Image: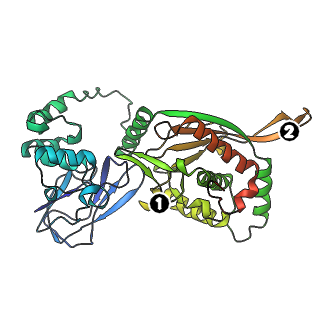
Amino acid sequence: MSEIVMPKFGLTMTEGLITAWHRKPGETVKAGELLFEVETEKVTNEVEASVDGVLEEILFPEGSVVSVGLPIARLAGGTAGQSPAPAGADAPSARKLMAEHGIARDSVTGTGRGGRVMKADVLRVVATPLARRIARRDGVDLSAVAGSGPHGRIKAADVEAAKRAEPTPAPAVAGLIQPDPVRAATARRVQAAKRDIPHFYLTRHVDTRALNRLRADLNAEAAGRVKLSVTHLLVKAAGLALAAHPGLNRLWLPDGILALDSIGVGIVTETPQGLRIPVADRVDGLPLDDLAETCAGLFARARTGTLTSTDVSGGAISISNVGMFGADTLTPIISPPQAMILGVGAEQRLFRPDAEGRPALVQEIVLTLAADHRLIDGADAARFLATLARLLEEPLALLRPPVSAGH
């Protein structure tokens, strides 16, 4: 018998909502058949069976929110369907735990990317069977439990103590609405991002007169093509700015810093299911018409709830444009594991002194860049924002291929 665990979709997923089981206990399952669906705050994922077998038991029904790596079902006659990743690819904290407890690596099922063994995977082995059973029954995350046994082995009493330490739910209040699981997961994610990421902010006013003229000229010749929006031009400019500052195209992960091999830009999108952040990839090299087509497809899938994991992966920066709602500025919260997010306000008409000091009517937007200080220093963020502003104020550069840093 093998255990089916909550899979990890994306670098920062910690829990998932089981929205559907496509097999019932006692039914035969074939490898490759759709078994269940998991929803995160980003996307709904369909999970296929990795081996043949019989679904012996479902441990968490539909509607359950389960931590990554916890068993959610048992499959009779099946074996682990994912070959282990190379030992050197395992999380350092996992390797340390396995060494401390003398645990053979091939006895641990990795839930990370490519079968990578994570700390939580080892903790399931380090914990006693009774502790694992209590944690599974009560939805306790073993990775948050301190073990009091030899070498930190988690015992049943440790799990019970962790349960008692949890805050007592407040009594029901008339008219109080409980958040649905997806909203609750989003709230936890945003709260953790604001608490754990050392944000700092830079603001810049950008003259959009040349950008507006270019956009109007391109759209006048857009027969049969997707009309270009300000967001399309912002995405392109952000991609080119990252190409000019490749040292910022990185993510902060629990195990270290990941340098991305392509330039993606996330776009905060309002949907009936809440906010989603699809990522347009390789935007620095995409012509504007192709970029507009790519964004149209991403927006359509976001609004119909059919985004894939690929659609929401990658990207060191996202853009949140609230200009269409009339807001002057936006101070945004970074979406982990990204390093930056750009808040964009509504276009404003105001007077600025011209070269001779006379008042001239201009059009401006206010850009607010939030950056992760663990990855980015203030001077680097300022240089990035200056490059972005120059690309928007001299927008003919958006029609050219990117220029690599140092050229």
Badge 2 density bin: few <14, some 14–19, many ≥20, Cα 10 Å: few
Which structural element holds mark 1?
Answer: helix
User: Can residue 120 be seen here?
Assistant: no
Q: In which quarter of the image is the C terminus?
A: bottom right
Determine the residue positioned at 23% across, 41% down: 143
Determine the residue positioned at 21% across, 50% down: 121
Residue found at the far front of this picture: 406
Marks 2 and 1, Cα distance to the nearest angstrom?
41 Å
Q: Mark 1 points at which residue?
A: 311
Badge 1 density bin: few <14, some 14–19, many ≥20, Cα 10 Å: many
Question: Front-most of 240 and 334?
Answer: 240
- Vertical placement of residue 131 versus 219, above or below: above
Q: In which quarter of the image is the N terminus?
A: bottom left
What is the x, y in percent for residue 373?
Answer: 49, 36
What is the x, y in percent for residue 379?
Answer: 60, 36
Marks 2 and 1, the one that precedes in the sequence: 1
Question: Front-most of 266 and 221?
Answer: 266
What is the x, y in percent for residue 68?
Answer: 27, 49
- For residue 331, which quarter of the picture? top right
What is the x, y in percent for residue 288?
Answer: 67, 63
Which structural element holds mark 2?
Answer: strand
Q: Which amino acid does label 1 sit on?
A: Asp
All told, the count of numbered labels is 2
Q: Classify residue 42 as left or right of residue 390.
A: left
Mark 1 and mark 2 in contact (Cβ < 8 Å)?
Answer: no
- Vertical placement of residue 314 versus 175, above or below: below
- Vertical placement of residue 177 versus 339, above or below: above
Q: What residue type is labelled 2?
A: Leu
Q: Mark 2 points at which residue?
A: 361
Q: Classify residue 203 as left or right of residue 207.
A: left
- For residue 345, which quarter of the picture? top right
